[in-house]
Image: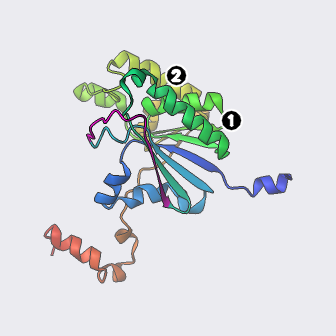
Amino acid sequence: MSNKETKNIKPRILYLDMAYTIKMVRERSLEQELTSRECGGYFDHVWGVHPIADIPENRKSTNDGFKVSTVEFSKNQTIIEGSSSYYSFLRFFFPLNFLVSQIRLVKRERISIILCADPYFLGIIGKFLKMFTKARLVIWVVANYDEIFEANGALGAPRILRRRWIEKIVHRSVFRSADLVAGGNKNNLQFALNNGASLDKSTIFTNGKLIHQQHLLERGLREKDALFLTSLAKYHFI
């Protein structure tokens, strides 16, 4: 393949995020959360991955083995949802099982970027994927976890890491392994810089991906949009 052909190839990204499951997105009309990952066609394809999608929905474990759900959200995006369900005698191998499947995916689909939406559980997965593939690691920081802990003692990943000192070790290790650290704003970025991120490998990705399409309409068209008027009536604005 020539250098010119290589330059024309769009990047492919593995997007690790646990904010919403595909079920939540559809029930709450949050499709923009997923559509925004495509960056207007910048990426050739996006693989959105939720490692433990059954947990936020409180699904009961059926002990029928490790399950992965794959949904073609759009022609440019595939959603992969893992499950924490497993045979009891294999319960300790769930992280390894999932990690191996993602390593295979990255290599098979020639994914060049791995983006993690937190520096903890997802950051750990991203760091190991980088170790076994040639993909670049991006950590997106959408909160100042130090300030949150100081304010109310809340941990960033209480179900997984359980101790503050463990979290500090993890996010420092993850930030130092990243090829790029992006803060959701200056405050979030400062948290990352205070905890191991390199200034010359840092930037800001502002949080704006949940802006509903209604707000992107011109003012004159907005007043004629049925969904917009329904929303106003629902919340008693008209």
> Splitting the image into 4 quarters, where does residue 110 fall?
top right
Disc 1 designates what residue? Answer: 134
Tag 2: Cα neighbours inside 10 Å, few (<14), some, or many (≥20)?
A: some
Nearer-the-camera pick, 28 or 119: 28
Q: Which residue is mark 2?
A: 173
Q: Residues within 10 Å of mark 1 (few under 14, many from 20)?
A: some
Percent position (x, y) of residue 38?
53, 57
Instruction: Name the secondary structure under disc 2.
Output: helix
Q: Is residue 169 left or right of residue 219?
A: right
Left or right: 154 in relation to 94: left
Magenta residues, dominant SS class = loop
Amino acid at the residue labelled 1: Lys
Q: Is residue 144 left or right of residue 4?
A: left
> Quarter holding the C terminus?
bottom left
Instruction: Tell me residue 128's x, y (percent).
Output: 57, 28
Residue 22 against residue 139 in the figure, above or below: below
Q: Amino acid at mark 2?
A: Ser
Residue appearing at x 56%, y 37% in the figure: 102
Find the residue positioned furthest to the front.
64
Residue 66 on the magenta segment: yes
Q: Which span is picked out in magenta?
A: 58-73
**Residue reaching furthest left?**
236
